[in-house]
Amino acid sequence: MSGTDRSVQAVLQARARKLAVVETQLQDEPELQLVYFELAQETYAVEAHYVVEVLPLQHLTPLPYTPDFVLGIVGVHGHIVSVIDLRSFFDLPRQGLSDLNRIVILRDGQMKFALLTDRAVGSCSVPKQSLQTSQPHLNGVRRDYLLGISTASWAVLDAAKLLSSPQLRVESYV
Amino acid sequence: MTTQQPQLQQRLLTAFRQEATERLGSLRDALASLEQADATPDVLETVYREVHSLKGAARAVNAQQFERLCQKLESLFSALKQHQRGPGQGQITLINQALQRLQRILNSTDEHTTKLVDADDDTLQALCTALEQSCTDPDIQVPVEQAAAPAEVAITAEPGKLRVSSQALDKLWFCAEDLLDTRLESAELASELKQAQADFTCWHRYRYELSAALRVLQPASGSPSDSAVPTFTTTISAAKTNTTITAHASNTEPNSVTAQAQHSLIVFAQWATEFLQQWDYRISQLARMAAQLAMRSTSLETAFRQELQQVLLMPCASLTEGMPAMVQELAEAASKSATLTISGAEYQVDKRILEELRSPLQHLLRNAVDHGIETVQQRKSAGKAGSARLSIDFIQLSSNRFGLRFSDDGRGIDTEAVTAKAIQQGVLTRQQASALSDAERCRLIFRSGLSTSPMLTELSGRGLGLAIVEEKVLRLNGDIEICNQPGQGCSFMLALPVSLSTYRILLVRVAGQLFAIPCQSINRVLRMPATALRSVENRAVLPIAEQSLPLWSLADLLQLTPQHNQKMLQLILVETTECQYLLQVDEILTDQDITLKSLGPQLKRVTCITGVARLGNGQLVPVLNMQDLYKRACRTERPMPVQQSATSAERQKLLVAEDSITSRSLMKSILETAGFQVVTAVDGVDAWQALQQSDFAALISDIEMPGLDGFSLTAKVRSDSRLANLPVVLVTALQSKEDRVRGLEAGANAYILKSSFEQDHLLDILQQLLSQEQEP
């Protein structure tokens, strides 16, 4: 090994030491992969494995004779996906649609729909333990579909419950 | 490696379940035909091969008991084949038991291992022993008929054909849809580039002038020191930027600096000219390529779609699989006897249509067995064969439509009883009933909620079943006809499209939104002057061909804001088996073929909407359900705006005095939507002038207005002999009690606060005032 190689090694090692951090107990704590988004000035999250896709809201077709929480339908890869406005379902303040609106497509077995979000979304993972499951300050429908509150005060929604909720399913006859 | 093993096992097991279920189904069908008709060598051969394959499949997933049972069955059929005879009654019972046992194993899942529960037990042991004995000692012998009738159920692979899972085909179909998006995007890209190329033409105009100007400057550019030459003062007026290059011979800066700058500019201009020229060429090339790409992807997408359409064609036999056995089981359960024969099953139809037809056909079968056919005794006393014959025939009707005729030789529909029931349930009046033809009476069985109990033997409340059948068939853009022969039987003829994309719709615009109406239910479209409308019993009607047809505004039925005051009405004459009516739309665009798509799993069924159509430009358009719409329209209690405009001669004219333009236009639109004719005034004086010039049914006035305010205007109205009785409604932001009193004192009939302003409230008050006025 030549002298220059050794000095390169030394520099690399020095950098490695500088960047190194103590590994957190990844094995022990179960992590929760979340996709988070903004809705009526609050941040919500759902478990990532229910999320199929996140897309900008485009070419929405509203449908008559559907409940208020059904914003309309969009075409995604040849499939028709209905877009649900949780603000309406949870009785939250509503504002107009903008270019920033994105939809988060959820899927579970047979059920599939998209949630309207106000603003861009991201994903991260949090330790499962950190979720606070008692929510005394929340009320109404929202509470029924909550998995817990994260340390960053995000409302983590129970996607499985949303997807299987008969209240969110529409089957109407004249 | 170890993790791969269970996954592989799981996949194998899933495949086995699927295959075995299919094979068991065809075995049951074949057995049903063996039991009913005389055995043919073909059927025996088929059965033998099915059992053999089943055995092989079971070995692959190591389902030992399943395999063992199959093996016993195989030897039994092998023996039957050898001796050229069909199975006896006892053998059939045994085989049936064995098949049931196999199905049970198939359906069972161990909770922990998700494997089949494939355990040996006494009953299995007994079954195996019995099957073994039955090989050597058949109880009853039925000779095999040598005349080879075509085998009803023969799952033989045709050469050159593949078995593809239906899910894979579905996915492929969605890929085709995705391809449409790609096609649209490439078309858009091509048009963008074409536009970019077109934008370059303005550059062409300047190019020559610029290069000419540069040529003039060229000799000087080489020697910046000679910058004082007069040529530098030339103004290049033609340059796009209109930049004037001027040399200031007498300015304070050193000449050389100016010259340097000029030189740079000239060099840059030269470079830019070449650069733009290159880009001009490149963009035109890109535009050409994009146009080609768009064209290619269009033809590829079209071809792919068409080919896929062909691939999706499946023989109708896949629809009727398992049905002969089902009929037998149903008949046995109802202590009747029936056989199902199928013809034309080789006819090819879009797989998605066949899938949709499965449950309606099962409904019809059930209905026929439960209600249509009689018991063996009843049949014999009526002089018919003891066993009822049901048949399903597939017939080609035209190049893109086929018929499914389902008939039975039962007692037929008792139209009298059905009509009586319909009257009893209030579906129609006695008078209406007497006007119905026999065919129309038959159709009453499709009315949902109308229980078919008058016709049935022991089960009741099956009314909904047939309604669902009709809805499904209509959804597929098909129709049903009933041919009823009381005492002799009944047949249902379902006419259906061969392909899903031959669903034809009429595209209409209502309140700025597009909707599709199935052409199947349209008689014709009309354009009529609004004055042609009449009002009958508070409903708008239009006399057409000596008939008064009810008319509704589609916007109103869909709870959208309708367009106002159209002189010519765009109308659609809707005609279904149940109803005939007119729909008013804002605009009729075009008719086209679409593929009807469902609304997705979350919207299982939405009132008035059958599904969604995807247009060529990717836009989604709701397809309307005309039956629902009619029911909805009949139920609407709110007065129709059309009905108001219908009586336009008697339309009441209102005067709205309001100085705020927002409130004024809001009120105008509310009142016009409710069917009033509205004249507006911007203040009290304006209103007073309007009142002098024409007659109004009522005055709606703001209180705070410049010049003449609402109170004074009211007082003025009351003091005028002609206007003294004019209803006056004051609308105001003033909240105080004093104002309210003052308003009423001035002679106003009503006083509405803007803060509590609700359109229904205003309309209610107006309705009250106007009707009061008419009464005395």
Image (cartoon, rainbow, N blue to C red):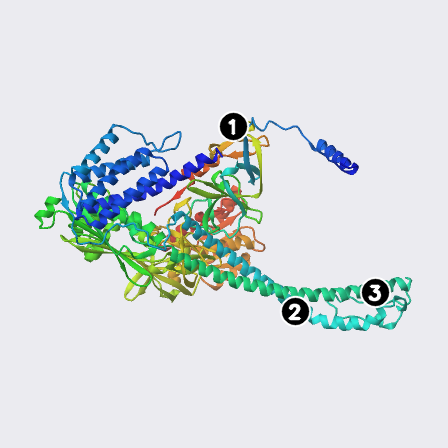
Q: Are marks 1 and 3 in contact (CB under 8 Å)?
A: no
**Mark carried by residue A133:** 1
- Could you tell me which secondary element the residue under label 2 belongs to? helix
Left or right: where does residue B646 sit relative to residue B758?
left
Using the rendered image, report if marks 2 and 3 lie on a common chain. Answer: yes
The residue at which mark 2 appears reads as B201
Classify 10 Å Cα crowding around label 2: few (below 14), some (14-19), many (20 and above): few
Residue located at (90% from left, 68% from top): B249
Q: CA distance from mark 1 to mark 2?
A: 66 Å
Using the rendered image, report if marks 1 and 2 lie on a common chain. Answer: no
Q: CA distance from mark 2 to mark 3?
A: 28 Å
Give the residue type that dot 2 points to: Thr
Give the residue type that dot 1 points to: Thr
- Please identify the residue farthest to the front as the structure is shown: B82
From the viewer's perspective, is residue B399 above or below residue A49?
below
Q: Pick the residue in front: B684 or B270.
A: B270
Left or right: where does residue B746 sit relative to residue B250?
left
Q: Are marks 1 and 2 in contact (CB under 8 Å)?
A: no
**Mark carried by residue B274:** none
Give the residue type that dot 3 points to: His
The residue at which mark 3 appears reads as B263
